[in-house]
Image: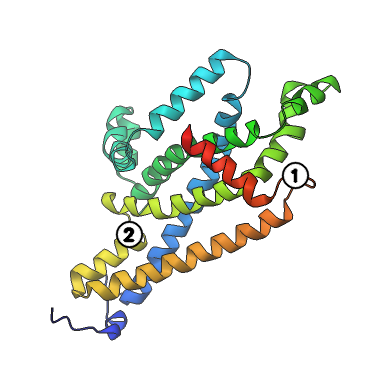
Amino acid sequence: MNYQWSWSSFNDLSPDGVHTYLQTLLIGAGWTIVLSVSAYVFALLLGSVIGVMRTVESKTARAVSATYVELFRNIPLLVQMFLWYFVLPELLPKALGTAIKQMPQPWNQFFPALLCLGFYETARVSETLRSGIRSLRAGQRQAALALGLTGFQAYRFVILPQAFRVVVPPLTSEFMSILKGSSVAMTIGLLELTGAARSMQEFSFHIFEAFSAATIIYFVINTIIVYGLMFFERRGTIPGSRSRATAGELALAEAEQS
């Protein structure tokens, strides 16, 4: 294979006529981070609600939450991306569907990708949180209720603060999963990091340089995430509890088996 490496190609002008290929990759990395963080916050908020519903005594709440989890967890992410982008506007009222399709780029690709990743990861986050709640001693909820707290207050002040501290390691893995899953947005035209690398490859024919740079950028972002959340994990250790690694690994293992 006679491949001519040319790292100077990053300084060439990209097809938009404004940015170099290096700048295009960095812009794509920016969209990757914005999309991943937005989807993670969405999934963390909704996933907390679904996760709590999975552990309450109400059979209806457990059935609804279980149906949600199984629906979104068992459909491939790529299929869901196409459904949100191509099918959803057609199911909405005509005026609203037309407004969505006429949104300026890249927002008309960003919001469907955000909804897709958010709802998909909500199912995984909820199962992770459910595992964290179940890893706590069962008597804590009864003790909170015996002190006069309502069920909502027991979850808010006693159960969830501890459960979130237990599941920081698997939640870190979920954030990294969202970051890597955001590359699927390339299929609907969003030029995040992988899409930007593919654009460089198609127009400059420097495939190895493009995807080598994308790999390095992904690695750097994920490394920052891991060490950043490790700091919060150390600060959030429950005094007198099991080791951080053991608690996190057990919660993650239980979530994967669910």
Res. 216 image quadrant:
bottom left
**Residue 6, position as x, y percentages in the image:** 25, 84
Q: Say above or below: 177 vs 59.
A: below
Q: Is residue 153 visible?
A: no
How many other residues sit within 10 Å of disc 1, few (<14), some (14-19) or many (≥20)? Answer: few
Locate residue 118 relative to residue 86 in the image: left or right: right
Res. 20 image quadrant:
bottom left
Count of number-bearing discs: 2
Locate residue 196 relative to residue 251 in the image: left or right: left
Locate residue 16 relative to residue 192 in the image: left or right: left
Circle 1 SS class: loop
Amino acid type, label 2: Leu
**Residue 118, position as x, y percentages in the image:** 46, 41
In the picture as drawn, the residue positioned furthest to the top comes out as 59
The circle on residue 241 is: 1
The circle on residue 224 is: none
Residue at horizontal 79%, vertical 46%?
240
Q: Say above or below: 142 vs 17.
A: above
**Residue 45, position as x, y percentages in the image:** 58, 38
How many other residues sit within 10 Å of disc 2, few (<14), some (14-19) or many (≥20)? Answer: many
The residue to which callout 2 is attached is: 191
